[in-house]
Amino acid sequence: MGVMRELVNMVINDKETAKSAYAYGLAYCFENLTMSEDDKKREKLREMEVTQEQWEQFEKLTKSGTGQKGRPDPPELVEQRIKAFVQADGAAALRALVLNGGSSRVLESVSRTYCNMASIQSVRPQ
């Protein structure tokens, strides 16, 4: 959590960080912290316009599949990461990225991160 807190504080406390070339990198990190490995794979397949079945068939035909499942990332771990991000004032960091002129890619990652955060009911404002 220490590294996450430092990244969040860097965005909140330094407006130049939120405007800089690595603003997208930070937004992307925050997005990936708040989603599961399965969600990442589904998103990548959606971008490629390929179904899970088509991808598995492609792997069989090309023998490119490893035959191994990805690293387990149960919903409980995703929820823990989201709660830690919220406790580290992650929402304020996302807000700073948006308010300081984030590019369209930054805004896209920030919006996905907010959606990922909203999937955990206990972190939603009351």
Image: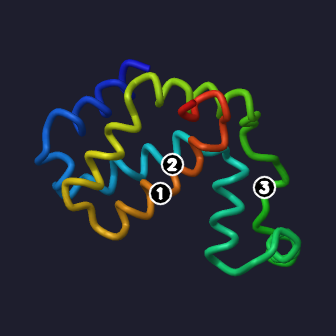
Residue where numbered disc 1 is placed: 111
Instruction: Determine the secondary structure under disc 2.
Output: helix
Q: What amino acid type is highlighted by mark number 2?
A: Tyr
The percent position of residue 68, horizontal first and vertical second, equals 82, 48
Instruction: Name the quadrant containing residue 11.
Output: top left
Q: In front of the other: label 2 or label 3?
A: 2
Mark 3 packing: few (<14 Cα in 10 Å), some, or many (20+)? Answer: few
**Are the residues at dot 2 and dot 1 in contact (C-beta closer than 8 Å)?**
yes
Question: Split into 4 quadrants, where in the image is the C terminus?
Answer: top right
Position of residue 93 measured from the top left corner of the image (x, y, whole percent): 32, 39
Which label was assigned to residue 66?
Answer: 3
Give the residue type that dot 1 points to: Ser
Residue type at mark 3? Thr
* Residue drawn at 86 percent across, 78 percent down: 61
Mark 2 or mark 3: which comes first in sequence? 3
Left or right: 53 in relation to 46: right
Q: CA distance from mark 1 to mark 3?
A: 33 Å
Q: Could you tell me how far apart the alpha carbons at marks 2 and 1 are, in whole angstroms?
A: 5 Å
Q: Which residue is mark 2?
A: 114
Check whether the beta carbons of the residues at disc 1 and disc 3 lie within 8 A of each other.
no
Eye-nearest disc, 1 or 3: 1
Residue 97: which disc? Answer: none
* Residue shown at 40% from the left, 24% from the top: 88
Q: Secondary structure at mark 1?
A: helix
Q: Nearer the viewer, residue 41 or 113?
A: 113
Residue 97 x %, y %: 28, 50
